[in-house]
Amino acid sequence: SLFATKKEQLSNINNYVCLNNTPNSCISKLTFKFVKVLPSSTTPYTSETSAALVVDGDSSFRGNLYTKGSTTVGGNLDITGDVNISGSLDVAKNIGFSGTTTFDGITYFGSAIDATATNTGAVQITGGASINKTLIIGATARVLSTTDATSSTTGAITTSGGIGIAKSLNVGTNATVG
């Protein structure tokens, strides 16, 4: 670590940045196009121009970067490695996923937007959906397919098991049993 509160405390020894001209306080040389160092403070900085260290230009870190406080990114954030989040992730706008996405634990969608067509509703899936356990629908289930049934394995709804009906069954045209 290297900590200085004044620019005059930093020196250059054999291409290393050193504190108070002391060789055992050196780190690999840093090159900045523009650096603005402000005195340390317990008050959080609220803008890019009032921060303790302002770098005008690109920065590269070959090791880990640890921030004890919040981090604000004013532009895009491109990550080529894994992202591990041990707390919550709050996203204020849209988020997109490409490739396979795995969610462990309960996944909750808080929108109450009702579906009136295949392209409306709180959750919209363009491809098929596979559910390995029980599906419970709290309101009306509606199938928009008009595929007619010609056997027990064709039609808009097919099932490998039986169907239990607690109330009335209304059939619009033919009913075949057996």
Image: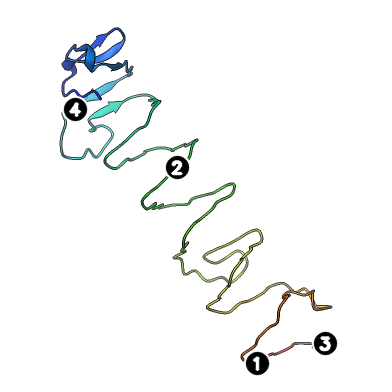
Judging from the image, the colouring scheme is: rainbow
Q: Tell me the crowding category of disc 1: few under 14, some 14 to 19, or many 20 or more residues within 10 angstroms, Cα based.
A: few
Residue occupying the point 30% across, 20% down: 34
Q: Secondary structure at mark 4?
A: loop
Give the foreground label among 1 and 2. 2
Q: For the residues marked 1 and 3, what is the alpha-carbon distance in whole angstroms? A: 20 Å
Which badge, 1 or 2, comes first in the chain's sequence? Answer: 2
Determine the residue positioned at 70% across, 82% down. 162
Dot 1 or dot 4: first in sequence order is 4
Residue type at tag 2: Val
Q: Which residue is mark 2?
A: 83
Q: Amino acid at mark 4?
A: Leu
On the image, the x and y values in percent for residue 102 come to 54, 53
For this rendering, which residue is in front, 161 or 150?
161
| Residue that numbered label 1 is attached to | 168
Q: Position of residue 174 (x, y in %)?
A: 81, 88
**Of marks 1 and 4, the one in the foreground:** 1
Residue 67 in picture, x, y percent from top left: 30, 37
Q: Going from the N terminus, do you reach mark 3 or mark 4 first?
A: 4
Q: Distance between the Cα atoms at labels 3 and 4? A: 85 Å
Q: Which label number is shown at residue 178?
A: 3
Give the mark toward the camera: 3 or 4.
3
Numbered tag placed on residue 38 in the rendering: 4
- Mark 4 vs mark 2, foreground winner is 2
Query: What is the C-alpha distance between the residues marked 1 and 2?
Result: 52 Å
Q: Residue at x 43, y 38 (%)?
A: 77
